Image: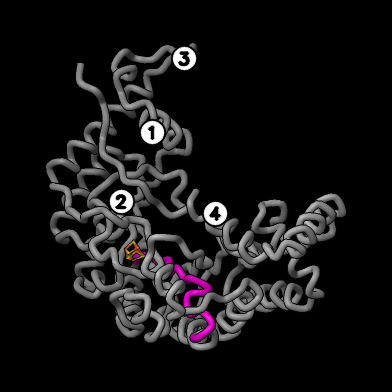
Amino acid sequence: MMTLTFEQGPIRPPSEANSLLIRLTRNCPWNRCAFCNAYKGTTFSVRTVEDIKKDIDTIAEMCRLIGQVSRAGEMPSELYQANEYQVYHIADWLAHGGKTVFLQDGNSILMKTADLIEILEYLKKKLPSVERITSYARSSSLIRKSVDELAQLKEAGISRLHVGLESGCDEVLKFMDKGVTAEQHIDAGKRVKKAGISLSEYVLLGLGGRKWAQEHPFETARVLNAINPDYIRLRTLAIVENTPLYTKLQQGEWEEQPDEETVKEEKILIENLGGIKSRLLSDHSMNLLGEINGRLPEDKPAMLKVIDHFLALPQAEKENFILGKRWGLYNRLNDLQDPERHGRVENTLNKLKSQGLLEATIANLKYQMVRV
Ligand code: SF4
């Protein structure tokens, strides 16, 4: 009996946690961004339409077999031969309605439009419960597709694209070797919007370091205002070993922003967002102020209020919150009011400070968070 298995990649956005993951391409075709180690040491390749269709057939068959699992939990014998992780993945996906699919890996939109359409149509035919199909897309690939091609992809089933904007500041984009300019980001984002595809833009707080602490958020707001994406998703930089940025840091070519400065940068970003109707989300545990979420423009004052609350805290409370958040004891600023957690953090904070280990510990906690 043949083992039922299909190919999957390692990464998906947090918002796609309940989506079925189908791999169209392997790894990242660029793989040069100075801060990123997601696909380091790997080679990019495009899978054949034939192989992807075979995977979709396998998934459809696994869905059919899972549907036959009896109330008593008896499974068809074929499922015992299947990849165990993938049986759970598909069962979980079906339990969530079997509605959403994420196409992996880092930039599958660069495939030929005709091939993508063939895959999307096949996917919808074989998995008729699917309502939303999303993918990562690099701006440099999006500007190689016309609005008409993107509209065809929308028609074939692409509902949302996730784009790593990171920054709207050309100096930062160049220094980080993002391989795209601010104007190209705008061009790409506008094309996606004109095609009627939902657009998520990811911003990396802290990426400007001390040098571009003002320009990075200000220019990023300018680019986002020009695009008017459906979602702005905030991420916070954590420097990972074996990346070019780590080397630049060691060699003194770039200086990291401490957390408090990154919050000031976040304030500049939000203050300068205007004339857009986007949903802004802090949907990653790396963000210090996870409660900054809302719709623009109406929730902007409330989001700035959270930032001002943090910035107005006495220094000792700021340090307590930063350590507690990075440690995973706090989620929100109001958690500072919990005497038990506050006391635990304070004790540790005092010990770390007396040993001169506070900064290194916070950096290490951030590093651990991006490794999981
Ligand atoms: S394009 Fe994305 S996945 Fe590729 S190296 Fe840059 S940040 Fe990493």
310, above or below 336, in the image? below
**Residue topped by disc 1:** 90
Observer able to see residue 248: yes
Q: Quick one: SS at disc 4?
A: helix
Residue at 76% across, 74% down: 309
* Foreground pick, 303 / 299: 303
**Residue topped by disc 3:** 73
Image quadrant of ligand 1 equals: bottom left
Mark 4 neighbour class, 10 Å CA radius: few under 14, some 14 to 19, many 20 or more:
some
Amino acid type for the residue under numbered disc 2: Gln
Give residue 365's position: percent from left, percent from top.
Answer: 60, 56
Is 119 placed left or right of 339 in the picture? left
Mark 1 neighbour class, 10 Å CA radius: few under 14, some 14 to 19, many 20 or more:
many
The magenta-colored residue range is 197-211
Q: Earlier in the sequence, mark 2 or mark 4?
A: 2
Amino acid type for the residue under numbered disc 3: Gly
Q: Which mark is residue 190?
A: none
Give residue 171's position: percent from left, percent from top.
Answer: 39, 86
Q: Earlier in the sequence, mark 3 or mark 1?
A: 3
Q: Quick one: SS at disc 1?
A: helix
Mark 3 vs ligand 1: CB below 8 Å: no
Question: Mark 2 and mark 4: span between their CA atoms?
Answer: 22 Å
Observer able to see residue 335: no
Of circles 4 and 3, the one toward us is 4
Q: Quick one: SS at disc 2?
A: strand
Of circles 1 and 2, the one toward us is 2
